[in-house]
Amino acid sequence: MLAQLAEFREAAQRTLDPAVLDYYEAGSGEEVTVAEAEGAWRAHRLRPRVLTDVSAVDVSVDLLGSRVGSPFVVAPMAFHGLAHGEAECATAAGAGAAGAAMVLSTRSSRTVEDVAAAATGCWWFQAYCMRDRGLTEALVQRAAAAGARAVVLTVDTPYVGRKGRVSGTRIAVPDDHFLVNLAQHLVPGSIGRESAEQDPSMTPDFIGRLAEVGGLPVLVKGVLRGDEAIRRLDAGAAGVIVSNHGGRQLDRAVASALALPEVLDAVGDRAPVLVDGGIRSGTDALVALALGAKAVLVGRPLLWALAAGGAAAVAGALDALADDLRHVMAVAGAASPAALDPTMVAAFRGA
């Protein structure tokens, strides 16, 4: 793990309520998948090029038509208000300051519009298919109106995974947090929390529906198989995100680092593939980008930074990751992400 991220984690451990820290760091089941995530990246080995001009290294990338300063993207995570008073507004400001994109969670502590006002860079909106699908559609339309450039539909959560550390599925959150974006759209007489839970009957046709409703490209997050990636693209997805939900859904699900090559092989040049899960350094990102990912999403480390120091710390964490990537790319002989390719990564030998 990058030293700066470890420092933010130590600060978060001192700052956060222990119950909140447990919620953020919890995995489902026996937490096997959580435990394997980081090691799966570290087990890869690199084959650098030499005698290439790396006097200037550019880590910026194009994401669905938006040029961003680095391939690190803030992953969608719930309830930033538990970590810091300015919540997702601080995270968005920090991401913008670092030139990084952000994915805003449906389960945010602040309204879509407030976060959009704080954002100075590219941001996407993460959606769940909720039991009242009108809630999802209303949020996607609001996000599009507020300036979101894409929708990230999370598909690996028909039910929220059980987490032993929190004695259920999630920490107790008051309605003013849980329903901050939803209350205005609830049907009179409905029970808000029930209406807002994930709909386990979702099928691929919902991808096209969201694209139609929001007028934005839809990326599908939660894909771990090549055949599933193709089915999602066939259903209208503009791209896929290889993810096991940070180990918070199906325990013993394959590590993202292991699933990525199969998905990339299946998708080819048809659509962008992104990845999350256990990215803790520039070298981890280098492996993912060399294999063929267009960008990497980072989750928990940015919550640690948020808790430790708000927007400035979020920017600091993202800057540290980008700087680390810039350095290791230079040492590996690549002046830009476009110069990376799978021949630079040796076969996976086991964690």
Image (spheres, grey):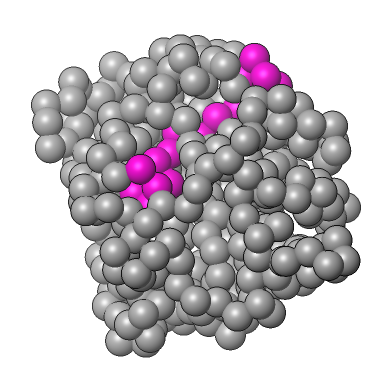
In the image, what residue occupies the spot 71% across and 25% down?
A: 205
- Horizontal relation, residue 104 to residue 30: left or right: right
Give the percent coordinates (x, y) of residue 188. Answer: 87, 66
In the image, what residue occupies the spot 32% across and 56% down?
A: 27
> Can residue 335 be found in the magenta stretch?
no
* Whether residue 176 is situated above or below residue 57 in the rendered picture: below
Give the percent coordinates (x, y) of residue 339. Answer: 43, 25
- Horizontal relation, residue 121 to residue 198: left or right: right
| Residue nearest the viewer, comparing 98 with 304 | 304
Specify the segment rendered in magenta: 233-250
| Quadrant assignment for the C terminus | top left
Give the percent coordinates (x, y) of residue 130. Answer: 68, 49
- Horizontal relation, residue 300 to residue 143: left or right: left
Residue 282 appears anywhere in the view: no
* Whether residue 156 is situated above or below residue 26 in the rendered picture: above
| Quadrant assignment for the N terminus | bottom left
Give the percent coordinates (x, y) of residue 121. Answer: 69, 56
